[in-house]
Amino acid sequence: MITLVRRAAVLSALGAALAACGTATAPHAPHPGASAPSAAPSASATAPSRPPTLAPGPAGLTPVFEHGPRAGAKTVALTFDADMTADQGPRAAAGEQFDNPQLIATLRRLKVPATVFMTGRWAEEYPDQARAIGRDPQFEIANHSYSHYSYTPDCYGLPTVAPEEMRPDLERAYTAFRKAGVPNPMPYFRFPGGCHDQNSLKALAATGVTAVQWDVVSGDAFATDADAVARQVLEGVRSGSVVVMHCTRSAAPVTEQAVRTIVPALREQGYRFVKVSELIGASTGRAS
Protein backbone atom coordinates (compact mmCIF):
# COMPACT_ATOMS: atom_id res chain seq x y z
CA MET A 1 0.00 0.00 0.00
CA ILE A 2 1.13 3.52 -0.70
CA THR A 3 2.23 5.38 2.41
CA LEU A 4 0.63 8.71 3.26
CA VAL A 5 3.85 10.52 2.38
CA ARG A 6 4.17 8.75 -0.93
CA ARG A 7 0.49 9.36 -1.71
CA ALA A 8 0.91 13.08 -1.05
CA ALA A 9 3.84 13.18 -3.44
CA VAL A 10 1.83 11.35 -6.09
CA LEU A 11 -1.11 13.72 -5.71
CA SER A 12 1.27 16.65 -6.06
CA ALA A 13 2.62 15.21 -9.32
CA LEU A 14 -0.91 14.56 -10.52
CA GLY A 15 -1.81 18.14 -9.75
CA ALA A 16 1.15 19.41 -11.72
CA ALA A 17 0.03 17.39 -14.70
CA LEU A 18 -3.52 18.59 -14.37
CA ALA A 19 -2.31 22.17 -14.34
CA ALA A 20 -0.08 21.55 -17.33
CA CYS A 21 -2.69 19.54 -19.18
CA GLY A 22 -4.83 22.34 -18.63
CA THR A 23 -15.77 8.75 -17.78
CA ALA A 24 -29.68 4.02 -5.92
CA THR A 25 -30.65 6.11 -9.13
CA ALA A 26 -31.99 9.59 -8.55
CA PRO A 27 -35.43 9.32 -10.19
CA HIS A 28 -36.00 13.06 -10.43
CA ALA A 29 -32.60 14.06 -11.79
CA PRO A 30 -32.46 15.20 -15.43
CA HIS A 31 -29.93 13.68 -17.78
CA PRO A 32 -26.85 15.95 -17.93
CA GLY A 33 -27.13 18.55 -20.65
CA ALA A 34 -30.83 17.87 -21.16
CA SER A 35 -31.55 21.60 -20.98
CA ALA A 36 -29.89 22.08 -24.35
CA PRO A 37 -32.43 21.57 -27.17
CA SER A 38 -30.11 19.33 -29.19
CA ALA A 39 -29.59 16.99 -26.24
CA ALA A 40 -33.09 15.58 -26.07
CA PRO A 41 -33.19 12.18 -27.82
CA SER A 42 -36.30 11.09 -29.65
CA ALA A 43 -38.39 8.47 -27.89
CA SER A 44 -37.61 5.01 -29.17
CA ALA A 45 -38.14 1.44 -28.07
CA THR A 46 -34.44 0.87 -28.72
CA ALA A 47 -33.21 3.88 -26.74
CA PRO A 48 -30.65 2.87 -24.10
CA SER A 49 -31.78 2.85 -20.49
CA ARG A 50 -30.43 5.54 -18.25
CA PRO A 51 -27.07 4.58 -16.73
CA PRO A 52 -26.94 3.94 -12.99
CA THR A 53 -26.20 6.95 -10.79
CA LEU A 54 -26.02 7.52 -7.07
CA ALA A 55 -28.85 9.12 -5.14
CA PRO A 56 -28.27 12.75 -4.15
CA GLY A 57 -26.08 13.27 -1.12
CA PRO A 58 -27.02 15.08 2.10
CA ALA A 59 -29.09 18.22 1.47
CA GLY A 60 -29.46 17.16 -2.14
CA LEU A 61 -25.80 17.70 -3.00
CA THR A 62 -24.15 15.99 -5.96
CA PRO A 63 -23.20 12.45 -4.84
CA VAL A 64 -19.56 11.40 -4.89
CA PHE A 65 -18.37 7.91 -5.90
CA GLU A 66 -14.86 6.69 -5.05
CA HIS A 67 -14.91 2.91 -5.46
CA GLY A 68 -17.22 -0.05 -5.93
CA PRO A 69 -18.03 -2.93 -3.58
CA ARG A 70 -15.04 -4.53 -1.88
CA ALA A 71 -16.76 -7.89 -1.39
CA GLY A 72 -17.72 -10.35 -4.07
CA ALA A 73 -16.20 -10.50 -7.54
CA LYS A 74 -12.79 -8.91 -8.07
CA THR A 75 -13.47 -5.97 -10.36
CA VAL A 76 -11.45 -2.88 -11.20
CA ALA A 77 -12.15 0.15 -13.38
CA LEU A 78 -9.35 1.83 -15.29
CA THR A 79 -10.24 5.46 -15.97
CA PHE A 80 -8.37 7.84 -18.23
CA ASP A 81 -8.55 11.63 -18.08
CA ALA A 82 -8.37 13.22 -21.53
CA ASP A 83 -7.20 16.62 -20.33
CA MET A 84 -7.00 19.82 -22.32
CA THR A 85 -7.67 23.26 -20.92
CA ALA A 86 -9.69 25.91 -22.68
CA ASP A 87 -6.64 28.05 -23.44
CA GLN A 88 -4.29 25.41 -24.83
CA GLY A 89 -5.22 25.70 -28.49
CA PRO A 90 -1.95 27.44 -29.39
CA ARG A 91 0.06 24.66 -27.76
CA ALA A 92 -1.84 22.04 -29.75
CA ALA A 93 -1.36 24.08 -32.93
CA ALA A 94 2.37 24.14 -32.19
CA GLY A 95 2.45 20.33 -32.07
CA GLU A 96 1.83 19.40 -28.43
CA GLN A 97 -0.06 16.11 -28.30
CA PHE A 98 -2.92 16.03 -25.84
CA ASP A 99 -4.29 12.76 -27.25
CA ASN A 100 -2.97 9.19 -27.04
CA PRO A 101 -4.35 7.02 -29.87
CA GLN A 102 -1.81 4.27 -29.14
CA LEU A 103 -3.21 3.90 -25.63
CA ILE A 104 -6.76 3.53 -26.97
CA ALA A 105 -5.52 0.99 -29.53
CA THR A 106 -3.80 -1.03 -26.79
CA LEU A 107 -6.95 -1.06 -24.66
CA ARG A 108 -8.87 -2.32 -27.67
CA ARG A 109 -6.29 -4.99 -28.43
CA LEU A 110 -6.26 -6.18 -24.81
CA LYS A 111 -10.09 -6.01 -24.70
CA VAL A 112 -10.12 -3.79 -21.61
CA PRO A 113 -13.35 -1.86 -20.98
CA ALA A 114 -12.57 1.64 -19.75
CA THR A 115 -14.11 5.00 -18.89
CA VAL A 116 -12.62 8.11 -20.47
CA PHE A 117 -13.23 11.36 -18.61
CA MET A 118 -12.99 13.90 -21.39
CA THR A 119 -12.91 17.68 -21.37
CA GLY A 120 -15.06 19.48 -23.91
CA ARG A 121 -11.99 21.28 -25.19
CA TRP A 122 -10.33 17.90 -25.89
CA ALA A 123 -13.39 16.78 -27.86
CA GLU A 124 -13.21 19.96 -29.92
CA GLU A 125 -9.52 19.42 -30.66
CA TYR A 126 -9.89 15.71 -31.50
CA PRO A 127 -13.49 15.23 -32.67
CA ASP A 128 -12.74 12.14 -34.78
CA GLN A 129 -11.11 10.39 -31.83
CA ALA A 130 -13.85 11.48 -29.42
CA ARG A 131 -16.48 10.12 -31.80
CA ALA A 132 -14.63 6.82 -32.33
CA ILE A 133 -14.17 6.27 -28.59
CA GLY A 134 -17.77 7.23 -27.86
CA ARG A 135 -19.17 4.87 -30.48
CA ASP A 136 -17.06 1.91 -29.34
CA PRO A 137 -19.08 -0.22 -26.87
CA GLN A 138 -15.84 -1.15 -25.13
CA PHE A 139 -15.61 2.42 -23.79
CA GLU A 140 -17.78 5.04 -22.16
CA ILE A 141 -17.18 8.78 -22.22
CA ALA A 142 -17.83 10.84 -19.11
CA ASN A 143 -17.53 14.55 -18.37
CA HIS A 144 -14.31 16.16 -17.13
CA SER A 145 -15.61 19.76 -17.56
CA TYR A 146 -15.27 21.90 -20.65
CA SER A 147 -12.42 24.12 -19.54
CA HIS A 148 -10.43 21.93 -17.13
CA TYR A 149 -10.45 24.89 -14.77
CA SER A 150 -10.87 24.16 -11.08
CA TYR A 151 -14.24 24.20 -9.35
CA THR A 152 -12.59 25.19 -6.05
CA PRO A 153 -9.98 27.78 -5.09
CA ASP A 154 -6.35 26.69 -4.77
CA CYS A 155 -6.40 23.48 -6.80
CA TYR A 156 -2.85 22.74 -7.98
CA GLY A 157 -2.57 26.14 -9.63
CA LEU A 158 -5.46 25.61 -12.06
CA PRO A 159 -7.50 28.67 -13.07
CA THR A 160 -10.82 28.78 -11.23
CA VAL A 161 -14.39 28.62 -12.52
CA ALA A 162 -16.74 31.13 -10.88
CA PRO A 163 -19.58 29.47 -8.94
CA GLU A 164 -22.23 30.73 -11.36
CA GLU A 165 -20.25 29.29 -14.29
CA MET A 166 -19.81 25.75 -12.92
CA ARG A 167 -23.00 24.27 -14.28
CA PRO A 168 -22.65 26.04 -17.68
CA ASP A 169 -19.06 24.76 -17.92
CA LEU A 170 -20.20 21.17 -17.32
CA GLU A 171 -23.06 21.52 -19.80
CA ARG A 172 -20.77 23.07 -22.41
CA ALA A 173 -18.70 19.87 -22.33
CA TYR A 174 -21.79 17.79 -23.15
CA THR A 175 -22.52 20.18 -26.02
CA ALA A 176 -18.99 19.64 -27.33
CA PHE A 177 -19.48 15.87 -27.14
CA ARG A 178 -22.69 16.07 -29.15
CA LYS A 179 -21.05 18.27 -31.79
CA ALA A 180 -18.25 15.72 -32.10
CA GLY A 181 -20.82 12.95 -32.66
CA VAL A 182 -20.47 11.20 -29.29
CA PRO A 183 -23.67 9.26 -28.57
CA ASN A 184 -24.95 8.88 -25.01
CA PRO A 185 -22.13 10.35 -22.89
CA MET A 186 -22.44 9.18 -19.31
CA PRO A 187 -23.96 11.19 -16.43
CA TYR A 188 -20.65 11.05 -14.56
CA PHE A 189 -18.41 14.02 -13.80
CA ARG A 190 -14.80 14.17 -12.65
CA PHE A 191 -13.77 17.46 -11.11
CA PRO A 192 -10.56 18.89 -12.60
CA GLY A 193 -7.82 18.01 -10.16
CA GLY A 194 -10.39 16.00 -8.23
CA CYS A 195 -10.98 19.22 -6.24
CA HIS A 196 -14.48 19.81 -4.94
CA ASP A 197 -16.21 21.33 -1.96
CA GLN A 198 -19.71 21.97 -0.63
CA ASN A 199 -20.25 24.88 -3.01
CA SER A 200 -19.27 22.96 -6.14
CA LEU A 201 -21.34 19.94 -5.13
CA LYS A 202 -24.30 22.25 -4.65
CA ALA A 203 -23.73 24.04 -7.96
CA LEU A 204 -23.94 20.79 -9.96
CA ALA A 205 -26.75 19.12 -8.02
CA ALA A 206 -29.48 20.00 -10.53
CA THR A 207 -27.58 18.37 -13.41
CA GLY A 208 -28.11 14.87 -11.99
CA VAL A 209 -24.49 13.79 -12.43
CA THR A 210 -22.58 11.53 -10.09
CA ALA A 211 -19.12 12.89 -9.27
CA VAL A 212 -16.51 10.18 -9.76
CA GLN A 213 -13.25 10.28 -7.84
CA TRP A 214 -10.82 7.35 -7.40
CA ASP A 215 -9.06 5.29 -4.75
CA VAL A 216 -5.90 4.43 -6.70
CA VAL A 217 -3.55 7.11 -8.08
CA SER A 218 -1.44 5.65 -10.89
CA GLY A 219 1.31 8.26 -10.69
CA ASP A 220 1.49 8.42 -14.50
CA ALA A 221 1.49 12.23 -14.53
CA PHE A 222 4.82 13.26 -16.06
CA ALA A 223 6.23 9.84 -15.19
CA THR A 224 9.14 8.49 -17.22
CA ASP A 225 9.31 5.03 -15.65
CA ALA A 226 6.45 2.80 -16.84
CA ASP A 227 7.42 0.03 -14.44
CA ALA A 228 7.10 2.38 -11.47
CA VAL A 229 3.61 3.40 -12.62
CA ALA A 230 2.61 -0.24 -13.01
CA ARG A 231 3.93 -1.13 -9.55
CA GLN A 232 2.03 1.72 -7.95
CA VAL A 233 -1.23 0.58 -9.51
CA LEU A 234 -0.69 -3.08 -8.69
CA GLU A 235 0.16 -2.23 -5.07
CA GLY A 236 -2.94 -0.06 -4.66
CA VAL A 237 -5.71 -2.00 -6.39
CA ARG A 238 -8.40 -3.70 -4.33
CA SER A 239 -11.68 -5.17 -5.48
CA GLY A 240 -13.92 -2.34 -6.67
CA SER A 241 -11.04 0.08 -7.21
CA VAL A 242 -11.20 3.07 -9.54
CA VAL A 243 -7.76 3.83 -10.98
CA VAL A 244 -7.02 7.32 -12.30
CA MET A 245 -4.70 7.52 -15.31
CA HIS A 246 -4.31 9.88 -18.26
CA CYS A 247 -4.92 9.82 -22.00
CA THR A 248 -2.50 12.64 -22.80
CA ARG A 249 0.82 11.92 -24.49
CA SER A 250 2.49 15.19 -23.55
CA ALA A 251 1.79 14.87 -19.83
CA ALA A 252 1.66 11.08 -19.38
CA PRO A 253 4.04 9.58 -21.94
CA VAL A 254 4.46 6.11 -20.39
CA THR A 255 0.83 5.28 -19.63
CA GLU A 256 0.34 2.97 -22.59
CA GLN A 257 3.47 1.02 -21.71
CA ALA A 258 2.36 0.73 -18.08
CA VAL A 259 -1.07 -0.55 -19.14
CA ARG A 260 0.60 -3.39 -21.03
CA THR A 261 2.06 -4.54 -17.68
CA ILE A 262 -0.92 -3.75 -15.46
CA VAL A 263 -3.60 -5.58 -17.44
CA PRO A 264 -2.10 -9.09 -17.60
CA ALA A 265 -0.85 -8.84 -14.00
CA LEU A 266 -4.30 -7.99 -12.63
CA ARG A 267 -5.97 -10.62 -14.78
CA GLU A 268 -3.54 -13.18 -13.39
CA GLN A 269 -4.71 -12.13 -9.91
CA GLY A 270 -8.31 -12.82 -10.92
CA TYR A 271 -9.48 -9.26 -11.59
CA ARG A 272 -12.05 -8.40 -14.23
CA PHE A 273 -11.92 -4.99 -15.87
CA VAL A 274 -15.17 -3.03 -15.93
CA LYS A 275 -16.40 0.46 -16.70
CA VAL A 276 -17.32 2.90 -13.95
CA SER A 277 -21.00 2.40 -14.78
CA GLU A 278 -20.77 -1.26 -13.78
CA LEU A 279 -19.16 -0.39 -10.44
CA ILE A 280 -21.84 2.20 -9.72
CA GLY A 281 -24.52 -0.26 -10.74
CA ALA A 282 -23.06 -2.87 -8.39
CA SER A 283 -23.00 -0.31 -5.58
CA THR A 284 -26.67 0.56 -6.06
CA GLY A 285 -27.86 -2.97 -6.79
CA ARG A 286 -28.70 -1.97 -10.33
CA ALA A 287 -27.12 -3.51 -13.43
CA SER A 288 -25.54 -1.04 -15.83
Image: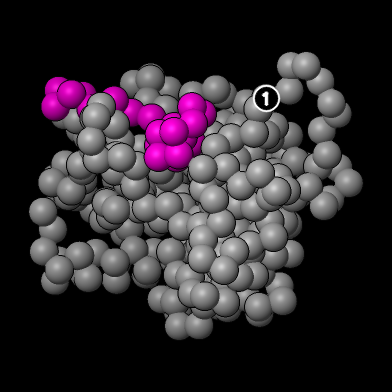
Which portion, as a residue range, is magenta? 267-288
- Please tell me which residue is depicted at 20% across the width and 65% down the height of the picture: 7
Q: Provide the secondary structure element on which disc 1 rests.
A: loop
x and y percentages locating residue 181 in the rendered image: 73, 34
Q: Is residue 281 visible?
A: yes
- Please tell me which residue is depicted at 66% across the width and 78% down the height of the picture: 163
- Please tell me which residue is depicted at 34% across the width and 42% down the height of the picture: 68
Asked if the magenta segment contains residue 278, the reply would be: yes
Asked if the magenta segment contains residue 277, the reply would be: yes
**Nearest to the observer: residue 229 or residue 141:** 141
- Amino acid tagged 1: Pro
x and y percentages locating residue 20 in the rendered image: 45, 67
Rendering quarter of residue 283 = top left
Apparent side of residue 163 relative to residue 221 in the rendered image (left or right): right
Residue under numbered circle 1: 48
x and y percentages locating residue 136 in the rendered image: 56, 24
What is the number of callouts on the image?
1
Query: Badge 1 local density, few (<14 within 10 Å), some, or many (20+)?
Result: few
- Please tell me which residue is depicted at 44% across the width and 77% down the height of the picture: 155
**Nearest to the observer: residue 133 or residue 138:** 138
Colour logic: one colour
**Nearest to the observer: residue 215 or residue 95:** 215
Image quadrant in which the N terminus is located: bottom left
From what the image shows, is residue 133 above or below residue 15? Answer: above
Q: Is residue 260 visible?
A: no
Apparent side of residue 227 relative to residue 175 in the rendered image (left or right): left
